[in-house]
Structures are given as structure tokens and as C-alpha cells.
Image (tube, rainbow, N blue to C red):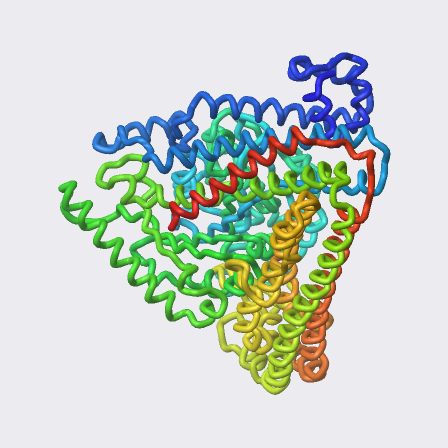
Amino acid sequence: MDDFVCNKLTEWGLSELIDRFKDHSMDKESLYDLDDQDIKDLIPAVGPRAKFKKRLKQLKEEQNTNQEAANSPVPVSPATSDKGKRNLDLQDESIKKQQPNKRQRDKKTQSYTESVILSDVKDIMGSVLKKLHHQDKTNLNNFLRTKIHDLKTDKKELIGVFGRTGAGKSSLINAVLGEEDLLPSGDVIACTSVMIKVEANMRSSKYEADIEFITSEEWKDEIWTMKQFLGNADEEWQKDADCRDVVEKLSALYGEEWKHKSPENLVDVKYFSEIEEFLQSQRKTLTCGSAKELSAKLVRYTRSTSRRRQGEVTRCFWPLVKCVTVKVPNNDLLQHVTLVDLPGNGDRNKSRAKMWKGIVGDCSTVWIVTEINRAASEDDAWEILESTCSLMGNGGQCQRIHFICTKSDVIGGSNDDADVRARIVQRNATAKEEVIVEYGSLNQVKKHFSDDCFKVFTVSSDEFLKGQHLNPEDTEIPQLQDFLKGLNDCHSETLNYVTGAYGILSLMHGANSTEGNGKKTDVCAELENNLSHQLGQVKQAVEDAHKAFETRLIEGVEKSQSSCERSMSSFLYSSARGFHRTLKCVVQKDGVHKTTKGKQINLNVKLASWLTDGIDEEFRKTFPNEGKCGSFNGVISSFSLDTERLMKENQSPKLQLIFLKTEEEKMKTKLNKTVRERKKTIYNSLTETIEKTMLDCYKRAAEFSGPDSLKYMRDTILEHVRVSKDMMFEEAKAAMLKLLNDLKEEILKTLQETLEESIELSLKTDDNSIPDVPDELEKVLKYYNELKDNSKELIFQLG
């Protein structure tokens, strides 16, 4: 058996199969030639066999991708469907023959080179892991094996796409990805419940869609609520938009039958015979050879269509769908990016709403899409931004807001090409100015985002594909594609992996040297002193931030206690038509309700507003989404054991110090990610604590019915707020401060324990059983230096 097969089995976590593969004289060529029966004979156990088949499939596809990249050094358009390619070929003759500029070609070549480097270094580390596998299981051996397993490249950027029905979201995504027929648009009515993720298909050349359903129990509860809602509606109320929304949802799945059936009858299995996966709590997968074919199959799961065709009723399943993940093959723009078509303000279904909130909080970028003819005055677009800014900003990780004005080619007047282009370009420039001015007036949003985070695009999906009046650059689709290419740049992830590998190999090579053993003791003592000093600085910085939050939260509690009853009364005594039914929806859904017009009512956010308003500015300074600054990320980023100076002064333990430097950088990267994730929980804890306090009140209010139900609901809520206000806001403050303290303790513990162990095993442990790796170290050092040079070149170009 050759090293390639052994390395792959080790890398895949299947090292227990090495001896069996060795007995069958497996080499690289025979590995690729294995068929299903061969694999079954080699691996009788189902679990390891399934894992092996999955990994082998991925390996073959990676080989095909690398081969295609090697054969096609000049980048091409991201369009992958035949129709998309033909449309791009038909663009204006003046730009048809344009070739990528030198910088673009260099970047593509660099990207390909780095993918080869990453693959090669992974193979090297797999081989090293195999060597360690055959050595004695000492502390250092176990430590090194763990460090190799921890080397990861898992970069993934999430882009949330918001916009009302008809704004052009689907056409925009299709055009940017070069997939004209991917997402359905045009003659169908969008359903605002279903989230659609679009990501790369890394395992197949097919177009696929994974459909995730809500649970059958959730649907039973939803049917009961909807039937109760409609059953209690008077004739006037039945004309309301909320009623029409419920009727649309039930009719989509059941046609007219729901009107004459009880909730118990409507969950009969006969209604779900076409989607057995729903009853089995499984995902349904659609696989097609083209984007157009997949799009046609997806309509029933994502949209409302005309339900009567040739006298037959076409049933739609979107009311049962939680999320659809569309997987696109052979698209470089999606390699490290997922686009998510999102409903504007969450969803009425609790599980969909929870998923929606999580995805919004994980977005590093959001695209807010609206038609250009009313971009600055579009209430829906600005409402989305204002209502989600806290989830994306302090409660999330969003770094960029792109306001995208669609249909920029739609303009009246003369048909003269030159005149049309000039008027479109001028109108686009005016629209951008108006949108930027409007953004400047959003004080609540500005608490979470700076002006630098906001950028406006004016796009035309049709013109990008057809090129009748505009050059591609005028449509600004290429600018969005360049943005995605930037997110897909995996240079930092490749460098992180190679740097980690370089450090591990340096430690292994250094462990086999006895030179300067006496010097190690002095260096070790200095490192321990540096660690103690640096930990003290980290502790001081985060404790200062804790005190600042405590001061502002105390003020917020006082304002909350003095203002909450008055604020709640102003909401509860609304004179809006049908308010009693709106309030009923609010209390039935734990204080949160989304109207059919897309507006969200959230009593928990309303009650927490004095607390959040009080800390928003301090929170953004402490936990900024951009860069490595702020009290937590700033002190972590500046943390240093001063290994650079020690390396210059002490050459004999240089290899061990190289390892400690790479370990320190890896630890800082890991902690910065931890802070990014934990700060969302910390910020959202204020609202969530208040929601828990209010839950009992909502449940009691939801039980009232009849003529005086509005009065009883109002009285129940106001009384609960009056009685609970003295402790409710104090508990929210305490919960947040505890989470801040927990984060501080975790940071200090991780830094101390990880680096103390690394110092102990690299400088205080003698282990002659560790295999030496001079050749592997030389290769990886070469790659490391090449990547560092590329980083300097990239900084020079960008500067």
C-alpha cells in the first residue's frame, strides 16, 4: 500500500482500515478504481463503509475540479447553464471579446496555486499523522495528533437577501450567479414563509435541492390556531389581510376541502402521500440535470402558483416547508459563500422564526433589494432594515449593508441607444444619492452600523444578460460578482492551515534536537512570565468593559421601571381597526407577531428597549463587527508571548518558539471567533430574559375569548408588567453581566491552559519517540514563505 492511500484513510478518520487496505495491496490508482462491490468486500461494517464512500466521492470530484482548473487557466464567466452561456455570448460586440485583466488572471492563478498548496500540505500532514499513528502513545505524541486534527479550513460567508415580493430578488441572484433559470420568478407569487439557501454543490455535478419541513406536530398546532382564528372571525373581519393570509395557506395545501374538515381530519396521512418525508421528519431531496428543471420542481415547495390546470387542483406544499437549500454545481462564486433569500421580518411559525433569527444573526453581509423607481421612499425596504438592525448589528456579525436598486434599465422616453444609456446612468446616480441621504436619517440603524458599512448598487439583471442599452459594468452585476469573488478568496484560510502545519512540523523537528537544552529552561521561564503578564492585561481590559456595561445597565433598569407601564398602555389601547384580533395573535405567539403587511410587533423588544438603547453605543465599541478592535477582540489581538524577540536572542530553541508563535496566532483566531459568536448571545439575552418573564402572562391572556376578551387581555398584561417590573429588568441586567463574566473566564482559561500545555510539551518534554520530519518541514516552509509573499503582494496591490 502506498503513502497516498494511508494518508487519506488517516485524514478521513478511518485509520483502523489501514491494515485491511494494506493486506489487499491498495495503491492510489486502485483506490480511484474501487466500485461499490469492492468497497463492500473491503469494509463490511455499514458505518465506516458509508463514511468511506462519501469521502472517496469527494476526492474524485476534487480531482476532476483540479484537472479542469489546470486545463482552463483563463477564468470564465460564472454562468454554468447553457442558456446562461448563450446569453452572455450575445452581449454587445464591443465588449464580447474582453479578456480578464492581468490582475484578475494573476488572482485566478494564485487561487489555483493556493488550492494546490493546501491539498499538498494536507497530504503531508496526513503522512505525518500516519507516522505518529505507529509510534508510542506518549503525551507529546497525543498532543501532536490532536493539533494535526485541529487544522481546519472551514470559511463560510453568509449573505442575507431581503426584499418584498416583486422586488427582483430571484432575478438578481440568478444574474449574479450566471444561472438565469435557477430560482423561479415572474409568473408566480412569492411565498414569504420559505427561506431559500443557495450554495455550492461540492459533491455532485447535478442541481440539487434539500427541502426541510416543519414537524407534523407544529403543523397540527398551526392548523388548530388557523381554524380557531377563522372560526371566530365576523363577516367584516373576514375581509382583513390576516384572514386572507390564513385562507391562502390552507387553500394552497388542501384546496377547498379545509372549509369542511376539522383540524383532526386535516392531518390525515392521505394529504401527505406525495411528501412522505414530512410524516417521517426527513428531508426531501430533488436532483436534476439543469437549473431550469430544478426550478420547475421547486415551485410547489416555495411559491403560490395557479392551482387549477385543466380542471385539476395543483397542491402546493410551501406551508409545510421550513427551508430549501439549493445546491449549484461548478460555480466558483459559491465556493465559500451561501446566499439566503429571506422573508422580511421572520415568520409566524415558531421554528421558522427561530431559524430566520439565527440566519440573520450569522450574515456577514445583507442585500436589501428594492425597485429603483421608489428606492428612497420604499417603506418595506427601510422597515426591514430598521426592524432587523439590532439582530444584524450588535446582536449579529454583519459588516456590510448593500442596498440594491433593481430594474435600473426600466425607463421611459426615447429609444435611441445612446440617449437611453445616458438617462439610465444619470437616473442611477440620482437614486444612489437619495438612498444615501435617507440612510443618514436612520438614527436607530446608525447605532449599529457606520456610514462606511453602507453601499448602494443600481442593477439590471435583464440588461446584464441581454445587453441592449447598457454595458455589463453599467448594470453593476459584475461589481456584485467581484464582491463574491473577494469573499471566496481562501488565502487567509490556506495561510492559517499552512502556518499551523509549519508550527507542528517545527516542534517535531525541534523535539529531535538536543542542542541548547540548558537554554530552554531560561526561555521557558521568560515565556511563563510573559504569559502571566499578558493574562493580567486581558483580565483588566475585559473587567473595564464589564464595569462600563454595568453602569449603563443600571441606568437602563431605572428608565425601564419608570416608563414600561406608560409605553405598554400606549400600545395596548391602540384604536386601530381589529386591534383585539391583532393582540390575540401577539399573546398566542409569546409576544411576537408578524402582520401580513410584513410589520413585526414584538412586545419583548419593546420592554427591553430602554436597556438596549442604553448599551447600544458601548456594545458596538466593545464588540465591533469590523476588524480586530474593541475591548475583547482588541486585547486578544494584541496578546503576545514575545516569541519574535526570543527567537532572535535564542537560536537553539528556535523551532519550538516557531511552534509557540503559530500556536498563539491560532489561539487568537479561535478566540476572536468565540467572541463573535458569544456576543450575539450576550446582546440578545436582555430581550430573551424579559420574554421568559412575560411568558406566563401571554399564556393567561391568550385564554380569554368572547366580547370582553380585549379588556381582559389588556388588564392581564398591564398588571403583570406592573407587578414584575421591579425584578424583571434587574434579572435581565444580571443575566447579561453574568454572560459577560463567563466570556471573560473562558477567554482567560483557554489562553492559560492552552499555552501552558504548549510551553510544557515543547520546551520541558524529552521524547525521542517522535519521528523526525526534516523533508516535510522543508516543503511546508517553502509553501509558508510563498503564501507570506503573496500576502505582501496583495497588500501592495490593494494599497
Q: Residue at x 47, y 25 (%)?
A: 69
Q: Quadrant of residue 682?
A: bottom right
Residue 394 x %, y %: 55, 65
Q: Is residue 460 above or below residue 569?
A: above
Q: Is residue 82 visible?
A: yes
Tell me the residue at 31%/47% (across/down).
Answer: 407
Residue at image point 68% right, 74% down: 732
* Relative image position of residue 426 (x, y in whole percent): 21, 53
As rendered, which of 755 and 417 lies closer to the eye?
755
Residue 56 or residue 46, whichever sits in front: 56
Quadrant occupied by the N terminus:
top right
Relative depth, front residue between 793 and 353: 793
| Side (left or right) of 658 relative to 101 | right
Q: Position of residue 453 (x, y in %)?
A: 43, 59
Q: Is residue 698 visible?
A: no
Q: Residue at x 79, y 20 (%)?
A: 43
Which residue occupies the extreme bottom position in the image?
562
The image quadrant that residue 632 belongs to is bottom right
Q: Position of residue 461 (x, y in %)?
A: 34, 41
Instruction: Please give left or right for residue 614 compared with residue 587 in the image.
Output: left
The number of numbered discs placed on residues in the rendered structure image is 0
